[in-house]
Image: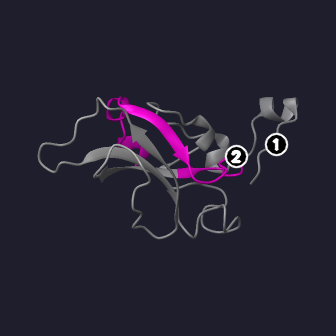
Amino acid sequence: MSSLISEDDLKHEAELVWLEDISCLDYVRQSLDRLPTRGGRPAYHRDGRMVGYATLGSEAKSSRASGTFRRRVFWLLPHDRDTEPDGLYAGSAPAEAVDPGSLKPRAKGRKTERSEGGPPSNAMQQLGITLPL
């Protein structure tokens, strides 16, 4: 879950690699996965699809116990809002979801009105900003 990821977990991130255009996504799910390498596209073993992943700098150390690295992976499930706009998450978002526009290396991202499926704020309405829902 996003809330369980700390900034300290991300201190060795070098880059976020996106596998598709995230500008049209209201949210992405993020998790910290144990992976065998610092970089490169990781294997993906969930339902749905991987949307992106983080690469780590050379200073990142592997776990002594497992020899793996903790890296973020960004993903979506088949029933998420991008493929089922009127489905389960039409007006909400999963716990591990964050607005992809708020993500950058070493920063865990945040929930926004857009990611949560809520109505635009008064300020957004006054500026004429609309969110794709």
Would residue 95 be seen by someone viewing this image from the given angle?
A: no
Q: Which residue is mark 2?
A: 23
Find numbered disc 2 in the image and state the secondary structure of the residue it sits on: loop
From the top left corner, tell me how far across and down residue 126 is, in percent: 86, 30
Q: Which mark is residue 130?
A: 1
Would residue 70 be seen by someone viewing this image from the given angle?
A: yes
From the top left corner, tell me how far across and down residue 20 is, in percent: 63, 54
From the viewer's perspective, tell me whether residue 133 is left or right of residue 92.
Answer: right
Question: Closer to the camera, 40 or 23?
Answer: 40
Crowd tier of the residue under label 1, counting other residues whose Cα lies within 10 Å: few below 14, some 14–19, many 20 or above:
few
Residue 16 colored magenta? yes
**Residue 9, relative to residue 132: is it above or below?**
above
C-alpha separation, residue under disc 1 versus residue under disc 2: 13 Å
Q: Which residues are magenta?
A: 1-28
From the viewer's perspective, tell me whether residue 84 is left or right of residue 14.
Answer: right
Question: Closer to the camera, 101 or 85?
Answer: 101
Q: Amino acid at mark 2?
A: Ser
- Residue at left offset 57%, top offset 54%: 93
- Residue at left offset 32%, top offset 29%: 8
From the top left corner, tell me how far across and down residue 85 is, in percent: 70, 64
- Residue at left offset 31%, top offset 48%: 37
Q: Which mark is residue 91?
A: none
From the top left corner, tell me how far across and down residue 3 is, in percent: 40, 42
Question: Closer to the camera, 87 or 44?
Answer: 44
From the viewer's perspective, tell me whether residue 18 is left or right of residue 126.
Answer: left
